[in-house]
Amino acid sequence: MVDSAEPDTRRGWHVLRVAVRPHRRVAAAGILTGLLWSASKLAVPALVARTIDQGVVPGDRDALYANIALLACVGLAGALIAGLRRWYAQLLAYLVERDIRQRLVAHLYRLHLGFHDTTPTGLLVSRTGSDLLQIQQPFIGIPMLLSSIVMLLGAIVLLALINVPLMLVALSPTALILVVAVRFTQRLGPRSEALQHRLADLSGVVQESVTGMGAIKGLGAEQPELARLRGRAAGVYDAAIGLTRIRATYLPLFDFLPALGLVATLWLGSVFVERGTLTLGELVLFNAYVLMLVGPLRLVGMTLSQLQRALVSASLIGELLEVEPEIADPPSPVPLPDEEGELRFEGVTFAYPGSDEPALRDLDLTVSAGETVAVVGATGSGKSTLVSLVPRLTDPSAGRVLIDGVDVRDVALDDVRSAVAVVFEDSLLFTGTIADNIRFGAPDASEHEVRAAARVAGAHDFISLLDDGYDALVGERGSGLSGGQRQRIAIARAILAPARVLVLDSATSAVDAVKEVEIRDAIAEVTKDRTTLLIAHRAATIELADRVVLLHEGRLVDHGTHAELLSRSALYRRVLARDEADNPETDTDVELVS
């Protein structure tokens, strides 16, 4: 779990400060234009009062026209400044949102696979989506809020200059407004967090429903899944209604309480005008400034609401950012030598967290540069664990994995993963064109290089038959293509990647025997000049290897050519027999290879 019981506003403030720091000039420009806007707004009532007292009341048309012209100029300047203020506020909000999203996604890329296996996808989607939108909102309002606060303070000073008793009456509701604001913020925080959690939960259910649509339809589980979705949606509705109820209770008070002060000032001001201690223009000016108090106070309430939700979201994002990667770059990385790709496992042991038995035990294996080694074993023997150690998807609990004599833990992650290309059993393709998918690991590859890789992988012929050829769009996860076609595109992608070591993790297990023959020819071509680890289940693919190693319960128990193992190992023959591949009755009296 990455979510805490209570939102940590200090963490949220830290995330926001870090995001704003590179854009201090934009923030300063927003604040400056906000101050100029406040000045223009404060000047308008004074000009109106001056127009009344100098032009309207005495009937001086020259003074009237001069003041009207000045008022128009100030109004036009205020409108232009308001546009600039909005521009800088929006710009700051989008820059902050962009930077936090990029920082968060880059951090998620660095986190180990175990984190992604145990963290709901919907939660991560929510953090990079709805939570960032919550952070964006107050940044739009904060420059305007600061300018409104300046306008509020300026109006108070000007009110005092006009008439102190009236000013005290006008500000009498302010203490109540502060109490309301504090209480509003205290009640809003926990409910904002509850809503964000439930939105993440709902995103997870939607994500699972969409990606698992085939299983849902195949099992006739539409109604149970819809009921599960309704339950999560009801939770979001309840949390949102609770939040709305609080806002509906408190936000109107930010309008009502200042209005009480306005009513009192109108009554008392009219008394002062009758007594001659206040001019009509001054009363109009005073009431204009009192009305100016209403907008800033309302904006304070709205911004407090937005800021509270933003702090909750920033705290939840900060919690993710604080997760330390288990697989990280070494303090002083060393480069890989410019060699051919010898791969060596020395005394490798690996145990998954919480497991009583290690998945690999004291394993020694050397794969010479350019050699193809097939890794064979029953389910649970440690095959996938073994190959995941090469690109440092996991690290061994003991022992070392070396590429060209260098421990992969001493090399920068980018360098290790650039040196190793992996084709998984589930060949994930991304939404985009076929060409884009082939050049996924080599984005600068030319069209000629893309086509050459596709030819080697045996994919060029079927791609050429598509209406748009290499520009044909691939659906999400490769929908629209057969399993064999997806695998061949994945192999072409691995060919194009500038890697010295190739890892094929059950690359033909998801297709039938006919398609496997086509893919096998592609694999034979790909592995010619590369060091290759090949996890395979069928004899036809295993025969491509120069050597075969047999794993049993995490140990290397035998190795040799395919023919040699067939002749001498009963365990090897049982592993290759598909109907008995998962039979737990395997040889237990097998001597380990020295």
Image (tube, rainbow, N blue to C red):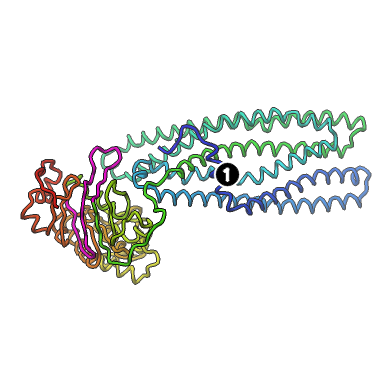
In percent of the image, x 15 and y 55: which residue is there? Answer: 538
Residue 500 among magenta residues = no
- Quarter of the image for residue 228 reads top left
Per the rendered image, the range of residues in magenta is: 347-376
In percent of the image, x 8 and y 58: which residue is there? Answer: 564
| Number of marks in picture | 1
Vertical placement of residue 4 versus 384, above or below = above
Q: Position of residue 526 (x, y in %)?
A: 24, 65
Looking at the image, which is closer to me, 296 or 357?
A: 357
Vertical placement of residue 164 versus 403, above or below = above
Q: Is residue 419 left or right of residue 134?
A: left
Q: Position of residue 504 (x, y in %)?
A: 24, 57
Task: Say what amino acid the circle numbered 1 marks.
Answer: Gln
In percent of the image, x 13 and y 42: which residue is there? Answer: 583
Q: Quadrant of the N terminus?
A: top left
Q: From where the camera sits, is residue 431 visible?
A: no
Mark 1, Cα crowd under 10 Å, few <14 / some 14-19 / many 20+, is many
Q: Which residue is mark 1?
A: 137
Residue 372 among magenta residues = yes
Q: Position of residue 516 (x, y in %)?
A: 19, 58
Vertical placement of residue 349 versus 282, above or below = below
- Quarter of the image for residue 159 reads top right
Q: Is residue 284 left or right of residue 446?
A: right
Q: From where the camera sits, is residue 454 visible?
A: yes
Q: Is residue 81 left or right of residue 100?
A: right
Residue that protrudes farthest toward the left in the picture: 567
Looking at the image, which is closer to me, 25 or 462?
A: 25
Looking at the image, which is closer to me, 229 or 201?
A: 201
Q: Secondary structure at mark 1?
A: helix
Q: Is residue 162 left or right of residue 134?
A: right
In percent of the image, x 53 and y 40: which residue is there? Answer: 12
